[in-house]
Amino acid sequence: MLKNLLIFLALKVRWVNTVLSVLSGIVLLIMTIIVFYAVIMRYVFNMPPVWTTETSTFMLMFLSFIPLGLVFLQGKHITVDFFTSRMTTKTVRFVNVGNAVVAVFLFSILCWQSSVLVYRAFHGEWISMEMNIPLGYPYLILPLGCGLVVISGLCRVVEEIWPDEIKAREV
């Protein structure tokens, strides 16, 4: 019963991460258009828009943290496989579980500390310099992205423990 629930949740987290990664692709396209617009306005018309730098910075924060859950879940992050390429499949799965547990711990701390930052930004009424918006809103990207990595790391543990069941239900 618990095993089926964990596998179901792992597949749902994978789906949510996939949707957010598609959204990240759209954000990347919009950011590219904004930067292109800023360059044209600055160098062709000599009228640089003020809002483009800050907007692209917040979009870059989004692109850095939100798709990180799927990257971690799929194991597409940068790895050094000098040792793991020489290990058995069972040992590699054990190492992957250990790595996921460490990542969950570290990203939990980062999630907590970024939540403190968001609280301070809202409580201190921090305002962005160019667009005059409360900085708490774009800073929310940090704990959300870290939270996704924590949840994805836990799902990675489930996928390493029951890889055959996950593959059978993905189809």
Image (cartoon, grey):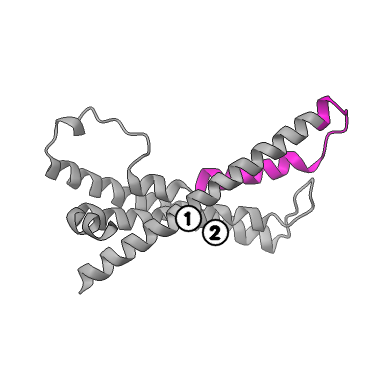
Residue sitting at the far top? 43
Q: Amino acid at mark 1?
A: Val
User: Which numbered disc flags the more N-terminal residue, 1 or 2?
Assistant: 1
The front one of 50 and 164 is 164
Q: Residue at x 48, y 49 (%)?
A: 21
**Is 35 left, or right, of 111 in this rendering?**
right
Q: Nearer the viewer, residue 122 or 90?
A: 90
Pick the quarter of the image with the C terminus: bottom left
What residue do we see at 34% from left, 46% from top?
74
| Residue visible at 32% across and 43% down in the picture | 75
Q: Is residue 126 visible?
A: yes
Residue 49 magenta-drawn? yes
What residue do we see at 64% from left, 53% from top? 138
**Comparing labels 1 and 2, the label whose residue is closer to the camera:** 1
State the image coordinates of residue 130 (x, y, percent, origin top left).
79, 45
Q: CA distance from mark 1 to mark 2?
A: 24 Å
Q: What mark, if any, has residue 19 been given in the picture? A: 1
Residue bounds of the magenta highlight:
41-65
> In this picture, is 25 found above or below 135?
above
Rendering coords of residue 149 (x, y %): 41, 52
Q: Local crowd at mark 2 within 10 Å, few (<14), some, or many (≥20)?
A: many
Mark 2 — residue?
115
